Each structure stands twice: as C-alpha cells, then as structure tokens.
Image (cartoon, grey):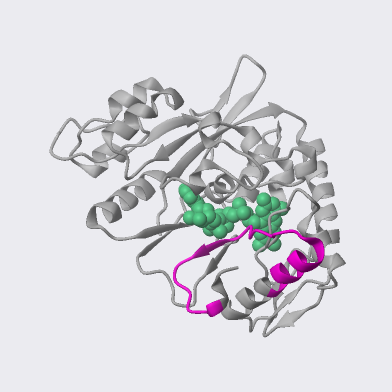
C-alpha cells in the first residue's frame, strides 16, 4: 500500500529494477482478478492528496478557470466533493462513479457519454512515470511533455531525492539511471470512449491536474444529487458488481442488446445478469471467477448470434485464470 504519489513512483521503480511484475490497484472497481491470483507485487494506491486551499495544487488562472491537482489514488467521489465544496464545476457527474483518479484516467471514465461527460475532457496535464522508458523513448516523447522535464531525466542515484516533492526534484548523483516522472498534456492520453493510451503503455499516473470552471457550490451540490438519483434509478444499487461489463458497441448500448436477447436474469452459479440493468452482472456473494467468465461467454455468444454484434469487455482481466472460458 502506498500513501503518496512519490511513494507510488518509488515502489514501481524498485519493483521494475528487481524484475518483479507489478500491478497498480486503484479501487478495484473495474477489474476481474484471476482465480490463480497475480504473481507479483500488487501496489494498492492510497495516494490521495487533493488541493486544500490556495496552494500550488489549487491555482486560479487568468482565463477564469481553476486548476486542481489530485494524486492518483484519490477517490473520484472525494475529488468531486472537494470541487463542489470549493465552487468548482465539471466533476459533479463523477461524484457517484466508484474508483480512483488513476483508474478513471486509465479508462476515461464517463457518466453520460452521449452528453460528452468524460473525465478526460477535464484533464489539463498529468504527471506520469514510464518505468521502462529508455532515453530514446524519452526523446520521442519530447513534444508531449514540459520540455523542462526532459532535462530532469538525468542519471540519478537515490530514489528519495529523485521522487520527493514534485517531479522537479532530482539527485545530482549519477550512479544509476532511474526514471523520473514526466508531465504529459491531455493530448498524450488520446482519450476516447473507454480508452486512454495507458491501456497500451506501461505507465503509472501519479498526479492529475484538472481544469474546472467556477460555479455555485449549492447549485453544483444539487446537480450532483440529481445525477445520483438518476443513476440510482437505473443501476442495481446495493448489489455486488463491476459496473458495466461490456463496452457499448456502435450499433446500440450493450445493455439494450443483452436485454433484447432475453438474457436479463440468466444465472451461472452465484452470478447473474442484472434484472435492473442488463450490462451489469451481479454477484449474490457466492459468485466465482469461473461463473463470471462462463456468464460472459454465454452473453457474448447470444448477442453475436441474435444481433450480429461482437461485445467487448469493459472490465480488465488481471492475473492468471484457470477457467477454460477465459477467452471471452
Ligand atoms: C457500481 C459501479 C458503477 C460504475 N459506474 C461507472 C460509470 O458510471 N462510468 C464509468 O466510466 N465507470 C463506471 N464503473 C467502472 C469503474 O468505476 C471505473 O472504471 C473506475 O474509474 C475504475 O477505477 P479504479 O480505481 O477502481 O480502477 P481499478 O479497477 O483498480 O483499475 C482499473 C485499471 O486501471 C489501472 N490503474 C489504476 N490506477 C492507475 C494508475 N495510477 N496508473 C496507471 N494505471 C492505473 C489498473 O492497473 C487497472 O488496469 C463502475 C463500477 C462499479 C462497480
């Protein structure tokens, strides 16, 4: 478990240097872990500092916007609540989305995609660690970064000096090459529906700077409560789930397709397709990984057969699976 962005970076670098596979666990709300577990280091990210007051983390700007920086382990709900309390608009739809800032950036979390409510739209820049970047890789990333960061990627010795404080810290001791964080702009992520470039790069989000508009705290609070009510009306609240299991294909929302094929309520072991929202699978508390995979396989097959649509999982598979149906 790590409690600060710097500790997160240091732990990843140590694991990388030791040749130990590692995985960043945010809130765990969008992953399915294999029944054989993950062979390596699971780093639970509890780095959750958000600006408190007018510090370097909370910067009013000339264009009327305000930037707020959050460490990647902060819960999205904490961040949204912080913004509302400070009269900053933009994050209210995300008050009810589970998980951390890092997880949200990884998948470009959304509330109502049809209304363009994606977390990526609010990102100004982020501090990222590329634990495997070679100097060549780094040179090719020049355009996406604060050029000053390039100069900071010098050979370094002590982890604590490299990573304490912000990415501007660096040790002068050139005893070995250890990666340091870089600032990347929003464009670097190539955000799109359920996608950010992080899904293809071995990179770790340390901190994210969001740009928000000024708003009235009371209005923002009531808007966020209204959105929460809306959400509670169509999601299986109180049940164990991973949220939506499938990405929405271009043809129609996945939940609609699943519903149309008559799969609501279908059960495998302790898992079933939710009666409330067909894109959710709910666990009655006894569901096992194998049940999830088998239910996914059945849903996928039926939707393909009756709708001609290939569903793609929205959740991410982590670790090793013994179950034969794992190829969903
Ligand atoms: C009931 C429910 C409702 C949901 N509703 C929504 C919704 O409305 N909209 C929506 O978009 N999603 C929704 N989700 C899905 C989920 O909340 C989001 O995808 C969330 O952003 C995942 O964040 P997490 O911290 O839990 O990520 P995790 O599940 O812990 O991790 C997901 C992936 O992100 C990676 N990751 C996490 N942190 C970092 C980091 N710092 N750097 C690099 N990679 C990282 C992990 O390694 C993993 O690969 C819902 C889930 C549930 C259970």
Q: Which residues are magenta?
A: 298-324
Question: Where residue 318 appears, x then y in whole percent?
Answer: 49, 64
Image label count: 0
- On screen, residue 226 versus residue 124, left or right, reads right
Question: Where residue 175 appears, x then y in whole percent?
Answer: 13, 38
Q: Is residue 97 visible?
A: no
Q: Could you say which is closer to the camera, residue 49 or residue 231?
A: 231
- Confirm whether the magenta stretch covers residue 154: no
Q: Could you say which is closer to the camera, residue 17 or residue 73?
A: 17
- Confirm whether the magenta stretch covers residue 315: yes
Point out the quarter of the image occupied by ligand 1: bottom right
Q: Residue furthest top?
A: 62
Q: Could you say which is closer to the camera, residue 322 or residue 37?
A: 322
Question: Where residue 109 appears, x then y in whole percent?
Answer: 65, 47
Is the C terminus in the top left, top right, bottom left or bottom right quadrant? bottom right
Q: Is residue 79 visible?
A: yes
């Amino acid at each position: 478990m790590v409690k600060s962005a710097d500790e997160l970076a240091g732990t990843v670098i140590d694991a990388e240097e030791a040749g130990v596979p590692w995985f960043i666990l945010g809130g765990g709300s969008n992953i399915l872990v294999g029944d054989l577990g993950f062979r390596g280091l699971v780093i639970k990210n509890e780095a959750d500092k958000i600006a408190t007051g007018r510090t370097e983390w909370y910067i009013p700007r000339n264009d009327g916007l305000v930037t707020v920086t959050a460490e990647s382990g902060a819960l999205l709900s904490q961040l949204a609540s912080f913004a509302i309390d400070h009269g900053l608009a933009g994050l209210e739809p995300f008050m009810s989305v589970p998980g951390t800032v890092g997880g949200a950036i990884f998948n470009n979390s959304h509330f109502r995609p049809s209304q363009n409510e994606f977390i990526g739209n609010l990102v100004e820049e982020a501090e990222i660690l590329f634990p495997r970047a070679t100097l060549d890789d780094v040179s090719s990333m020049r355009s996406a970064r604060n050029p000053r960061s390039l100069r900071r990627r010098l050979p370094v010795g002590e982890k604590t000096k490299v990573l304490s404080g912000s990415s501007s810290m660096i040790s002068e001791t050139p005893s070995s090459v250890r990666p340091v964080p870089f600032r990347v702009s929003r464009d670097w992520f190539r955000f799109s529906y359920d996608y950010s470039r992080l899904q293809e790069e071995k990179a770790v989000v340390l901190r994210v700077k969001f740009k928000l508009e000024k708003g009235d705290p009371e209005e923002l609070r009531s808007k966020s409560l209204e959105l929460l009510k809306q959400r509670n009306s169509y999601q299986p609240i109180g049940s164990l789930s991973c949220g939506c299991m499938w990405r929405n294909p271009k043809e129609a929302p996945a939940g609609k397709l699943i519903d149309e094929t008559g799969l609501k309520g279908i059960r495998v072991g302790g898992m079933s397709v939710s009666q409330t929202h067909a894109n959710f699978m709910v666990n009655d508390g006894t569901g096992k990984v194998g049940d999830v995979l088998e239910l996914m396989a059945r849903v996928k097959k039926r939707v393909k057969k009756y709708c001609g649509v290939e569903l793609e999982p929205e959740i991410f598979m982590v670790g090793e699976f013994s179950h034969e149906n794992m190829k969903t």
